[in-house]
Amino acid sequence: MLIYMLEDDQVIRDLVLYALRQQTDLEAQGFERPSAFYAAVRSRVPDLILLDVMLPEEDGLTVLKNLRLRRETKLTPVIILSAKGTGYDKICGLDGGADDYIPKPFEIMELLSRVKAWERRLSLTAQEASGEEQPREYRIGGLTVSPVYHTVTADGEEVRLTMKEYEILCYLLAHQDQVCTREQIFGRVWGYGSERENRTLDVHIRTLRVKLVEYGNLIETIRGVGYKIRSSV
């Protein structure tokens, strides 16, 4: 798995890259400036991106926005690593399209755990795409989701989702009219679960509802348990 890290603090960048490179199945490259990062992405799209927020040239949230506008990287998982660790900062990052948010300072082992969870998820997604486990598409009214082509449309208009939003939606669609607990969603989509990450799931659900426009109300909150999606409008 190829990982790009955009971080202007050389100490942090070198430490994280060293830890990642000790894992025999991970390839990691670091960048100090967005310009060098963009050039690398144009040459080779990574499987996962670790992104700082406070950067020279342009801030990390702008970088994130640009990534989500590019077809090649619109679904590439992005983990924000930032010293801006308030609840508001985290919500801004997740709303902006990040798949995960880890405040600084962080434990290297926790970061490695999340990276490995992503590796498992990407491997499973690839296996499912090459097999026949998923239906060709889901349809609820004018909402169409194609697991084969990783596309989502609402009344014929493309809906741009992050990888996490997309996986949450597909998981709910695979269990229509069934209550999916928070633990089940975390286990399937994140590969790990934690009570302190409940806010992360809530933010992803909220942004997913907004992006689906009128079809966002198909997703129902089951208070104290989790979420479910209705099979009809």
Image: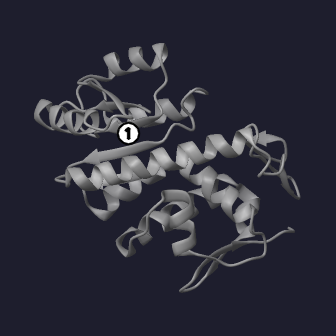
> Could you say where residue 119 lies in the image, as x and y percent from the top left?
46, 44
Task: Please name the residue shown 31% across and 28% down the image.
Answer: 58
Quadrant of residue 146 in the image?
top right
Q: Label 1's element? A: helix
How many neighbours does mark 1 have within 10 angstroms: few (below 14), some (14-19), or many (20 or more)? many
Q: Is residue 229 above or below residue 212?
A: below
The C terminus sits in image quarter: bottom right
Q: Is residue 107 left or right of residue 193?
A: left
On the question of residue 37 being in view, the answer is yes
Q: Position of residue 12 (x, y in %)?
A: 15, 38
Where, quadrant-wise, is the N terminus in this rendering? top left
Q: Is residue 63 above or below residue 211?
A: above
Q: Residue furthest left?
A: 11
Residue at position x 38%, y 39% from top? 61
Q: Is residue 38 left or right of residue 87?
A: right
Disc 1 target residue: 61
